[in-house]
Structure formats: C-alpha cells, structure tokens
Image (cartoon, rainbow, N blue to C red):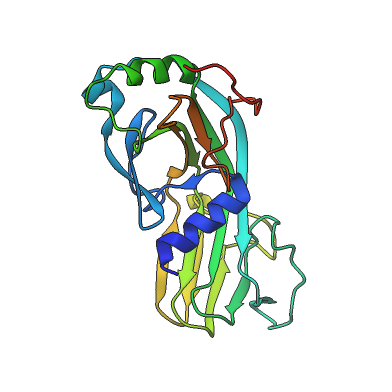
Amino acid sequence: MGLAAQFESIVERQLNVHAAWVPVTTPYKLGDYGLISDGVFQKLGNIQDDFDVTFTEGTGPEATLSFVSDNTTVVDASTGAAINLNPQGELQANVTYKFHQDKSFLVKAPVITVSVIENVNQVAKQLKKADDWRNKFKVVFQVFVAQNPLILSTVEGGTEVTIGAEGSALKTFNVGSASAGFSMKTTKELGLNISGKTGVIALGLFKLNFFSGNTEFMGVGDEGKVENLNGAALTDDL
C-alpha cells in the first residue's frame, strides 16, 4: 500500500472522511470537485467557477486526529526508559518514538476546524441541470483544517524520532508554537514530515447517484449509502 493510501486509511478510520493529499500543503476549498485516483481525491476544479453553482457556507464542530502505528515504542529521551503513553493521547515533549515496522505513521492534530456546505441538496439540484456534469465526480462539502499538526511516516523499520521542546519535561506542547522551542531528530529518512503549519488535512465528499440523482455522502464503507447530513436516509429524489 502506498503512502497516500495509508494516510487515507488513517483519516477514514479516525474521522470517517477522506484524506487531503498531500496533507496541509495542498490547498482545497468547499465546492472543489474531482475524482478518486489511486485511493485519494484528485481535484479537477470548483463548482462555483466551472458550473456557476452557488452554496451556503457554515462551520461544524471542532475535531481531533491522533494516531500512532502499532509496534511503536515510546521512551524518555533523556533516560531511555519506556513510557506508557496512550497512542490516542496528546503529543508530548522529550520523548523518542521507536518505529519497529516499515511505513509507520505518527499523526497528531489536536485542533481541527471544519467548514461545511450547508445546503447540499440545493447544490445537487443545480449540478443535475449542468450539461457537462458527470456523476462520477465527487464534491467537497466539508473541509477539515488542522492547526499546527505533526504528520510523519517512516520508510524503514527501526527508525527513531525524538520530539523535543525547550523547558519541557514530558509536558504537552503545541508543535507549531515557536515559544515551545520545538525540535525533531530522526535516525533515518522519513517518507512524510509535516510540522508547524496550518492547512487542510481531510475532506468530506459527496456525489450524485448515477440512477436516482440522490446525493451519496462518502464515508468509510458508505459509498452507495444515501444519507443526509444528519445521517437519516433520503427517500426523495433531488
């Protein structure tokens, strides 16, 4: 499984939406449309610009994303003693993550803000009337923006990554905060290394059903399940 597909799997499992690839560094916005290619969303354009579709924007509840691959050991960087950290807990300073498997991940995004298209049904009605619209297109109706996340992946097993912060002794800290004196050292090459930046990390997608024209909100295993934003089944064609 490739790096993008692995990150997609993590985001789906944690947030029940799809990964923005490459995370943080690639700009996405509400109304972007495209295709799923090699397991991740590939943008082709925006429905406002290309199809003159209008929509109402809103905000959703904040989320978090915390993931550490299995077979990862965490030790005190100063003593080498093993530490029992909750894999889903907050990132801590002055610790070393020992990744025993190839292609392991550490993802910490303590604050994720969400913007949403509030009138998806009306958007779908507009798209149905667009001559050049294709039902295989997916539309971004949720954008998850992570504030100062840490996202890294290893290439080889045996990679060690030490997270440090000045003045901290196993205390939680903000990766993107300059005052924290954040530092990271690694013993081997990393496949992905993103820290201290704010950007899009995940996307909520919908598409139009080929036969009925209903909206299909695409979560984990839900492609083909017709729902509205509250999870209730839709019975009427749009």
183 shown above or below 121: below
35 shown above or below 13: above
In depth, the one of 11 and 218 nearer the eye is 218
Q: How many numbered circles does the render carry?
A: 0
Name the quadrant containing residue 29.
Answer: top left
In depth, the one of 146 and 121 nearer the eye is 121
Measured from the top left, where is residue 85 in percent x and y? Answer: 74, 66
Q: Residue at x 47, y 77 (%)?
A: 186
Q: Residue at x 57, y 62 (%)?
A: 165
Query: Which quadrant does the N terminus fall into?
Result: bottom left
Q: Is residue 174 visible?
A: no
53 shown above or below 190: above
Q: Residue at x 49, y 18 (%)?
A: 237
Name the quadrant containing residue 172.
Answer: bottom right
Measured from the top left, where is residue 204 in percent x and y? Answer: 49, 37
Measured from the top left, where is residue 111 in percent x and y? Answer: 58, 42
Q: Is residue 220 left or right of residue 154?
A: right
Q: Is residue 27 visible?
A: yes
Measured from the top left, where is residue 24 in percent x and y? Answer: 40, 48
236 shown above or below 95: above
Which residue is the extreme one toward the front? 211
Q: Is residue 228 left or right of residue 84?
A: left
Q: Is residue 148 left or right of residue 54?
A: right
In depth, the one of 98 and 9 nearer the eye is 9
In depth, the one of 205 and 142 nearer the eye is 205
Q: Residue at x 53, y 57 (%)?
A: 9
